[in-house]
Image (cartoon, grey):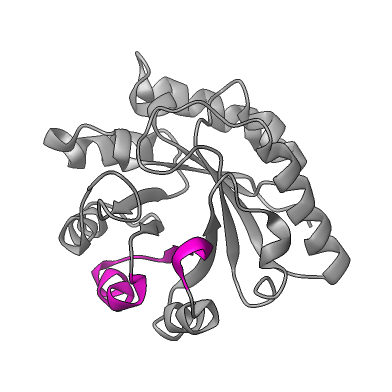
């Protein structure tokens, strides 16, 4: 059975002065979930928000909340983010020494667990963790800021993950984040992505609601 392709708008590009209205808008336009980028100014060169904002997002929507932890020592904050309403939590391969333990911590607290990789991190390094994760998040820009252009070599990483999934009968999904727009979302989905994050392409559009509807229409029949 073919899985439904999904789009999670990223609040990193939303208007924080009217965050509740922004969430309501994308929900009405067909968003499948809400993506929250958590940055600490150390692992990545930007600072965003913490569990208190995620809690407010949870109060504003029943959609799945996807929390991407771009922070050092994520294991110290995972439980708090899940208690605040996170349904999916991803941590980075690059700064997680005890990745198995961190993945287990996420699952034990009731959320789906994902591992994220930066554009320069090769897929083969994940082979020993793939059977334990619910999803793999491919960063298709260097993390830290929204509005960047898609890095083209990520198509190959999508194909590699899809091949590993099929070869080893794994059940993980593939998520992609960075530079996703109406021009490339069909291509990444066809290569094997299950759900995509869209930030600036949606919230930065002249009509964000219509843009999200357009992107949803593109992926609906894939």
Task: Name the residue located 63 percent from the left edge and 26 percent from the top edge.
Answer: 184
The quadrant of the rendering that contains the C terminus is top right
Task: Name the residue located 59 percent from the left edge and 46 percent from the top edge.
Answer: 120
Image coordinates of residue 11 in percent, x first then y, are 31, 41
Residue sticking out furthest to the top = 206
Residue sticking out furthest to the left = 17
Image coordinates of residue 162 in percent, x first then y, are 77, 54
190 part of magenta stretch? no
Placement of 44 over or under 186, stated as above or below: below
Image coordinates of residue 26 in percent, x first then y, are 36, 36
- Please state which of residues 184 and 142 is positioned toward the viewer in this rendering: 142
Q: Residue 199: in sight, yes or no?
A: yes
Task: Name the residue located 21 percent from the left edge and 59 percent from the top edge.
Answer: 50
- Please state which of residues 3 and 52 is positioned toward the viewer in this rendering: 52
Q: Residue 222: in sight, yes or no?
A: no
* Magenta segment: 73-96
- Please state which of residues 31 and 175 is positioned toward the viewer in this rendering: 175
Image coordinates of residue 108 in percent, x first then y, are 44, 86
Picture mark count: 0
Q: Is residue 38 left or right of residue 138?
A: left
**Residue 95 falls in which quadrant of the image?**
bottom left
Placement of 154 over or under 132, stated as above or below: above
Q: Is residue 81 left or right of residue 70?
A: left
75 part of magenta stretch? yes
**Residue 12 falls in which quadrant of the image?**
top left
Placement of 166 over or under 82, stated as above or below: above
Q: Is residue 62 left or right of residue 158?
A: left
The quadrant of the rendering that contains the N terminus is bottom right
């Amino acid at each position: 059975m073919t899985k439904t392709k999904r789009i999670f708008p990223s609040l990193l590009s939303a208007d924080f002065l009217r965050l509740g209205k922004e969430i309501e808008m994308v929900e009405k336009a067909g968003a499948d979930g809400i993506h929250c980028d958590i940055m600490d100014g150390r692992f990545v060169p930007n600072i965003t928000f913490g569990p208190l904002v995620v809690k407010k997002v949870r109060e504003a929507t029943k959609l799945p909340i996807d929390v991407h932890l771009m922070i050092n020592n994520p294991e110290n904050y995972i439980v708090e983010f899940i208690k605040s309403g996170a349904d999916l939590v991803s941590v980075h391969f690059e700064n997680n020494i005890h990745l198995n333990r961190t993945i287990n911590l996420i699952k034990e607290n009731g959320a789906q667990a994902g591992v994220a990789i930066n554009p320069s991190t090769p897929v083969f390094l994940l082979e020993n963790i793939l059977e334990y994760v619910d999803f793999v998040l491919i960063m298709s820009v260097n993390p830290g800021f929204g509005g960047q252009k898609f890095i083209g070599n990520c198509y190959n990483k999508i194909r590699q993950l899809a091949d590993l999934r099929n070869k080893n009968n794994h059940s993980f999904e593939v998520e992609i984040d960075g530079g996703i727009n109406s021009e490339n979302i069909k291509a990444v989905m066809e290569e094997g992505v299950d759900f995509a994050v869209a930030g600036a392409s949606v919230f930065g559009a002249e009509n964000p609601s219509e843009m999200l509807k357009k992107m949803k229409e593109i992926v609906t029949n894939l």
